[in-house]
Amino acid sequence: MISLLVVEDEQSLAESLAFTLEKYGYQVRLTHDGNEALKILEEFTPDLILLDVMLPGKDGYEVCREVQRLPKVIPIIMITARSSETDRVVGLELGADDYVIKPFSTRELEARIKAVLRRKKSESTHPEPESDLAIDFERRIAKRLGTTLELSPKEWKLLECLATHDGQVVSKETLLEEVWGADFMGDPKTVEIHVYWLRQKLEENASKPKHIITVKRKGYRFEP
Ligand code: CA
């Protein structure tokens, strides 16, 4: 059974929410106060929190901020009476997953609860793969799995050029022009050779590159 903590000080709204959500099959715990909500969270971990913004005690934003500090990830849907864009953005920036604006239908709310839970579940089963590369262009430090890579000035320029076109294909001609300069009398082979060297340093397996991808007949694409 999916458990919800509903934090809402408007008595009648809170009770009708709890009633309807229980009818939908959720286990609902109700509180009318921000401080009380945090106390409840010390001994109870709901699957999701429905959190009103304007509350006695700590307001919804403060509760939201404190929930982010808890060791467990608990998704939050903010309930807001304010319709201004900034208020919504504040909630999302504090870590809320979604929001509903009063008045809302319980059907809409339930759809959002389901969407948030679904998203959280897929995030936890398919976590974003972390890159093995850490590149600081400003300080010119590149690391792979924590080990600093020694890159030549040309390799830096090449990497920088590829990375600034983030995700887009860069042709060998463009690379020649941007890295070696328009008056350089070289040919695309020069680029190929430097890409080869760069891959030796950057890639776990240079023959199966994950960061500098060859796009046939077009050029190269950088993946962080
Ligand atoms: Ca309120």
Image (cartoon, rainbow, N blue to C red):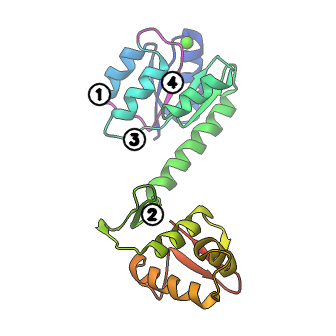
What range is drawn magenta here?
A: 42-57
In the rendered structure, find residue 51 and report the number of the disc placed on it: 4
Mark positioned earlier in the residue sequence (3 or 4): 4
Mark 3 surroundings within 10 Å by alpha-carbon count, few (fewer than 14), some (14 through 19), many (20 or more): some
Figure quadrant of residue 18? top right
Q: Disc 1 residue type?
A: Glu
Q: CA distance from mark 3 to mark 1?
A: 13 Å
Q: Do the CB atoms of the residues marked 2 and 1 lie less than 8 Å apart?
A: no
Please give the residue where the numbered disc 3 appears in the rendered image.
73
Q: Disc 2 residue type?
A: Pro
Foreground: disc 2 or disc 1: 2
Mark positioned earlier in the residue sequence (4 or 1): 1
Secondary structure under the numbered disc 4 in the rendered image? strand
Please give the residue where the numbered disc 2 appears in the rendered image.
129
Q: Examine the rendering and report whether any part of residue 210 can be seen.
A: yes
Rendering coords of residue 189 (x, y %): 60, 91
